[in-house]
Image (cartoon, rainbow, N blue to C red):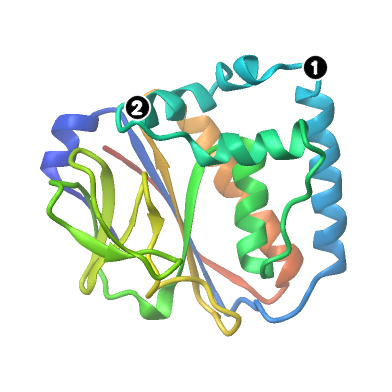
């Protein structure tokens, strides 16, 4: 399903890409059980990191690996900002839609960057590649963005579907009527494969909470 370009291998050798695909999932109803799990996760994160300061939190792994990656592009790792809002500002995981919330929960728990896509809008295969800086795509907010050279990106038969720095595209975003959902995980060099495997397992468990009929179609880790 995913192809890793030789260009990307030359620059980010040792990195990993995770992919997990579900068929026949439901994304239309609020789930009480998921709400309970969200509250439990928020409490766990506050207990785990409550005595940290912001600098300490940014120095923990795997966050530091992402922070270092983002610094090369003069950007801030947004999952770290979201984790800070939960731990230090007593914010809650936002209510969006069940299949998006499961992704947010796994991201916060494991701090691994994840993008979600409606599989029915994707034209296979997906190529994981290195941006050259001349590529454009439309972000979730509708803004057209030019990529920064040297970023990891994913491209299907229709164009760019995500990049690390700017996130998922608008066309393949998870919608209320999404039934077949693909989650992809960017893990730059330095992320342990065991953590990525655990992250995919967490996504699987969360999706099954909100959609008991969802069928796990594919779960795979690709080495760059």
Q: Position of residue 104 (x, y in %)?
A: 63, 52
Q: Residue at x 81, y 31 (%)?
A: 46
Residue 111 visible within the image: yes
Q: Position of residue 129 (x, y in %)?
A: 20, 48
Tell which of 50 and 197 is nearer to you: 50
Q: How many marks?
A: 2
The residue pinned by badge 1 equals 51
User: Quick one: SS at disc 1?
Assistant: loop
The residue pinned by badge 2 equals 189
Q: Residue at x 12, y 53 (%)?
A: 134
Q: Residue at x 18, y 47 (%)?
A: 131
Disc 1 from disc 2: Cα separation: 28 Å
- Which residue occupies the extreme bottom position in the image? 177
- Image-quadrant location for residue 31: bottom right
Crowd class of label 1 (few under 14; some 14 to 19; many from 20; radius 10 Å) = few
Q: Position of residue 118 (x, y in %)?
A: 46, 74
């Amino acid at each position: 399903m995913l192809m890793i370009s030789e260009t990307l291998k030359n620059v980010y050798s040792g990195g990993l890409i995770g992919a997990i695909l579900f068929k026949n999932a439901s994304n239309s109803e609020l789930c009480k059980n998921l709400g309970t799990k969200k509250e439990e996760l928020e409490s766990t994160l506050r207990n785990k990191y409550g005595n940290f300061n912001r600098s300490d939190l940014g120095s923990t792994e795997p966050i530091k690996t992402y922070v270092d990656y983002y610094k090369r592009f003069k950007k801030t790792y947004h999952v770290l900002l979201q984790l800070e809002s939960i731990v230090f500002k007593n914010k809650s995981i936002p209510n969006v839609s069940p299949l998006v919330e499961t992704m947010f929960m796994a991201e916060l728990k494991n701090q691994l960057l994840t993008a979600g896509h409606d599989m029915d809008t994707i034209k296979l295969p997906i190529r994981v590649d290195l941006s050259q800086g001349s590529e454009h795509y439309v972000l979730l907010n509708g803004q057209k963005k030019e990529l920064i050279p040297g970023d990891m990106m994913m491209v299907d038969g229709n164009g760019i579907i995500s990049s690390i720095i700017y996130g998922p595209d608008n066309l393949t975003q998870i919608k209320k009527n999404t039934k077949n959902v693909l989650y992809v995980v960017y893990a730059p060099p330095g992320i342990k494969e065991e953590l990525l495997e655990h992250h995919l397992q967490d996504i699987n468990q969360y999706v099954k909470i909100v959609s008991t009929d969802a069928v796990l179609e594919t779960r795979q880790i690709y080495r760059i």
